[in-house]
Image: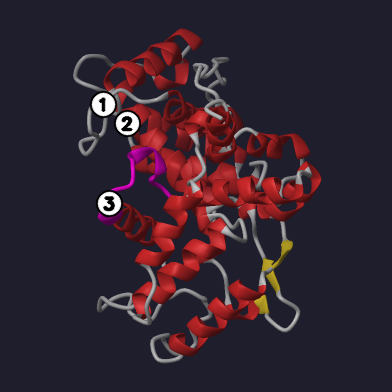
Amino acid sequence: MLVPLANWHNPAKRRLEAIRAAHERNPAALLELLEAYLVLKGRKRATLSLRTLENYRLAVRDYLAWAWSDTQSLEILKATADDLDRYIADLQLHGGHLENSENQCLKPGSVATYLAGVRAFYRALEWAGVAQLPQVHSPRDPTPPEERRPALPQSLYHKLLQHLSGTEPPNCRDRLAVRLMAEAGLRISEVVNLWVDDLSLSERLLLVRAGKGGKKRSIPLSRALVQEIQGWLRLRLAYAAPGEKALLVNLGGRKANGRAMTDRSLRKILNRHYRDLGFPERYYGAHMLRHTAGTRFYKKSRDLHVTARLLGHTNVNTSAIYAKMDLEELFEVVDQLED
């Protein structure tokens, strides 16, 4: 996490540096301001996840590329709600504006992520005393959440576990990662940040030290998952770098061999497995596995409070989506019509 630079500590210097950065069109300096604001004044402060920080950086870089493009020259310190509405419309119609963007129109969820970063940027400019946050709203997604973020059907989940069966170290590691998300309900960030010391296998408990919002929670583990972890721990001894605390480690590559995995590398590995199995694209991604866990928790318990507790949701209403996600239950109803 960034240690804020001295120029951003002092209100007078902060204002001058922000004006200079905007006038000179210096994205690096403006990103420094954003990060200093998030660490010192943001809602989560120093507990802000690196993934969120990366998303905010990407959003601000994209916004500045749009604002300072060949077709316009927007004074970002004087931007209005209408200007941000134009930016949103451009994202919807043409996609991102950075060189490596795919130039495809963005879905409402992606637009909302970009807009969250831009809002944080203007809060940082407000903190510097050089601009105001324009009041603008994200476009509403008409697709219900349970359709946007489906759970993996049990038949495909069993197919995935079968694909990862065997004693090869990569398969053992990847299978454990999958089961931690689909059976214990962990987020991918929580999986890659797990330490060996976070496990208390004699109690069948796992500690998430820093979940979403910096929250801790203890998760009960099934006996089968405890056995899976024990098997991986024996293999891990031969591959983990000296002093490495992470439960899941890289098994190849000169730079990261034996070191902790990143969520990016794990996402790539998971998507490769999905491609190898020919899964429909709606079932790609890592968070889909957490939705799978939520659906299973609710189906077994029929209790949203239990589901919320296992997933680490503060508000039980957040867990209500899992009551609508079970496609298999819908198939059972449809199939009964044929009887």
Q: Residue at x 54, y 58 (%)?
A: 181
What x and y, as percent, mark residue 27?
35, 37
Cα separation between marks 3 and 2:
42 Å
Crowding at dot 1, Cα within 10 Å, few <14 / some 14-19 / many 20+, comes out as few
* Amino acid identity at mark 3: Arg
Query: Disc number at residue 280?
Result: none
Q: Please give the residue where the numbered disc 1 appears in the rendered image.
A: 104
Q: Secondary structure at mark 1?
A: loop
Farthest residue to the top: give it. 82
Instruction: Say which of 302 and 136 sits in front.
Output: 302
What x and y, as percent, mark residue 214?
67, 55
Q: Are marks 1 and 2 in contact (CB under 8 Å)?
A: no
Q: Is residue 149 above or below residue 3?
A: above
Circle nearer the N terminus (3, 2): 2
Q: In the drawing, does residue 279 fall left or right of residue 198?
A: left
Circle nearer the N terminus (1, 2): 2
Crowding at dot 2, Cα within 10 Å, few <14 / some 14-19 / many 20+, comes out as some
Question: Which image quarter: residue 79?
Answer: top left
Q: Residue at x 38, y 46 (%)?
A: 284
Q: Secondary structure at mark 2?
A: loop
Q: Which residues are magenta?
A: 275-285
Cα separation between marks 1 and 2:
26 Å
Query: Disc number at residue 275?
Result: 3
